Amino acid sequence: MQAVISPRTNVQFKINGVAYTIDETTDPSTMLSDFIRDVALLKGTKIMCREGGCGSCVVTADIPDLTTMKRKTVAVNSCLCSVYSCDDWLITTTEGIGDSRSGLHPIQTRLARYNGSQCGFCSPGMVMNMHSLLQNNSKPTKKEVEDSFDGHICRCTGYRSILDAMCSFADDISPCVDIEDLVLPSCSPRDSLLLMPRGAPWFRPNSLQVLFDILGKSQFKQIALVVGNTSTGYLKNAVTYDAYIDTTAIQDLYSIEVSSVLTFGANVSLTKMIEVMDQSASQKGFEYLIKVTQHLRKVANTSVRNVACWAGNLMLKHTESMFPSDVFLLFAALGVNIKIQSSSSTASYSMEDFMTLDMKGKVILSADFPKLSTDYKFRSYKISPRLQSCLVVPKEAKYEVFPTSQWPDLTQQTVAQVLGIKKNQLINPELFIYFHYTVFISGPVKMHMNFNTNMEMIGRRFPWLADYEVGVDNDGRLIGVKITIYADAGCSPNDHSLFPARFSDNGYLPGIYIMESIMEDIARKLGKDPIDVRRINFYQKGQKNIAGDILNYCNVEKLLGDFLVWADINDRKKSIEKFNKENQWKKQGLSVVPIRYAIRWTGACFSAIVSIYIGDGSVTVTTGGVEMGQGLHTKSAAQYQTYGVSSAEVELDILTGQSQINRVDMTYDCAISSINPKLDIGQAQGAFIMGLGYWLTEEIKYDRITGKNINNSTWGYHPPLPKDIPVDFRIRFLKDAPNPDGVLGSKAVGEPPQCMSVCAPFALRKAVEAARLEIGQHDDFAHDSPYTVEKTHQLCLPDITQCVLK
């Protein structure tokens, strides 16, 4: 192609200061995350979803910015970046900023000091996200810090300890980076690239003329125009391209102009678009852009928006009509026109016309945002984790097995059964989390299940259905209860509806919800406060429970009384009642739920070895369990009871179904003294937040014919994110709760607080009831969870005739 003059035939970048050059022998489908781990051999960067949805792969990248002709530092999802896109990048991973040998970076130290790392899988991505932010702003506000973590998932800590660690930099008097010393160097115009790997060639033209020469002369049927390459997180391998054209060297596509319209070039990133819109919103006619940026900040997440361009989002919508494009929705609602150029002409199109346009040989140039009157209004809303792996190394007469397993004993049994060998021929030198079956050959075998297959295989939870009849006296005291419970567990791992993975509390969570739902229904029928109904049915000290355990330390009566005062429940209920009377489109709800959780270990027997060393008397304990940050090696299992009370205060937007947990209070029986208070608080917070996902956001959808889990990605399955946690989260551990059966009087602090999250769906339900009462609806409705945004919105019985702007 004559228009491409002496294009460079390699890609050059640096990782932690080390230069790398790749040529056409490297496949363009190689992602930066894989290169970092497999070529640079830096294992700190993790890989999970490959969708840009979890944040575990985030690294810092210093990249050219043709909008300003300077370099910029951004957090990027390395799992979405083709190595061909990384030309002239300076990449930094967690190893590049500090380690235990050369010294930790202040961010790493701060995260450890705040106990913000438990299993540690998400920590490198969290650290590098904060590092990227501080490179641009040494004194960010707390809001800026929290907003930047909108694309990171943690299943251990509940986020509060992580956010506290990161937000401590907002007011730090000795910031890690002095912004005055940060000089953003200029970047030169980018040259052309041409790489011809086996399969699809990779072009990088440096002008529109060269781009149209390539488009006009090529014989390729499927061509992908690449800027941020983030569409791979949605498409995965669903589309095969014959050629790739990287447009990041075309400066004309980075233009930004403000006149009678606000114009953005096609390559402008969503992050840059938000920044410019915030600045332009002070101008007459562009005031509405403040609302637009609020919506754009809900598109993907920070590390995706840093490199993704708006035009790529629209093109994905054009080629994949089912793609849920918030950008398309906004542009259509605002009457934005986009300019599209071919080799012979340029024309403007509305969003509707664009969707019907044949884009072959055409390129989006820019988008024009019009000025609007100040009375223009709109409302918007927006609707896990470690993977299964196994490494097996054959040894003489033995197999060395490295499973990611939480149940090494069962793993050992299963592998031995599959191979037809004795258990003592298997060695588990390392214990991780979860397990996977594999088939062995004469050499080492390593299998790593991808995220989507992992979700399809074991991502489903047990569905439960409970029908009940209950008899009570006038005070709400239980006289008789008959409950028929149905659980769809599948008949085998190969059942057509798939074998589900149980939640980590072995059935307590749904069991507690079923019983507490009955308490709520009794209170509603009798016109009583649910607190009073629960209180009159408490176990008393010295009574036996249904399993025959004597409750010698039952303190739930006193626990609840103290809690109501400590959490100021009565005054807050009055305040919520007043709020609901004064607000039509927002409602609040508050729920208080006490629990009793029995720690029982039955039907399981695990081995343990205790070694006492002669020299100094130190001790090593080796068990059949897995340390996952929960303090396994400082506690032991026994049979005992734990008690607690929790409350949640929720605010619901009736028009959208969105809700925010404004406050959570928790009093938990953590025995006389916590062995490690910081760890236990982190465990309690993390468990509670995991429970919130179970009740509010994590919905499983599957094909009823094939049983396939169709909600098998971060696009559809939503664990709680950092902005989903309670605004105010207060935890108090009891100091007068003896447990002679535990080591040093300790008690479990994982599953019980998870079950205490049951207060949240009941609080949200009360807000829904307030909305229904507002329109005269007094009918009961089923306690179906999870209470997703869509489901909650529909439970409010929205009536379009009421939605009139005045």
Image (cartoon, helix red, strand yellow):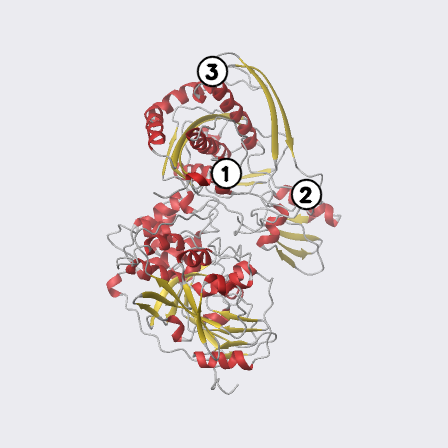
- Where residue 794 is drawn, which disc sits there? 1
Q: Which residue is mark 2?
A: 497
Q: Secondary structure at mark 2?
A: loop
Amino acid at pointer 2? Ser
Badge 1 crowding class, 10 Å Cα cut-off, few under 14, some 14 to 19, many 20 or more, is some
In screen coordinates, is 544 left or right of 660? right
- Where residue 249 is drawn, which disc sits there? none
Query: Closer to us: mark 2 or mark 1?
Result: 1
- Along the polypeptide, which appears first: circle 2 or circle 1? 2
Q: Which residue is mark 3?
A: 536
Badge 2 crowding class, 10 Å Cα cut-off, few under 14, some 14 to 19, many 20 or more, is many
Amino acid at pointer 3? Ile
Return the x and y of residue 540 as percentages of the image width and height: 48, 15
Return the x and y of residue 47 as percentages of the image width and height: 52, 57
- Along the polypeptide, which appears first: circle 1 or circle 3? 3
Q: CA distance from mark 2 to mark 1?
A: 27 Å
Which residue is located at x 56 percent, y 80 percent? 218
Seen as rendered, the residue at the extreme right is 420
In screen coordinates, is 664 left or right of 466? left
- Along the polypeptide, which appears first: circle 3 or circle 2? 2
Which residue is located at x 35 percent, y 67 percent? 263
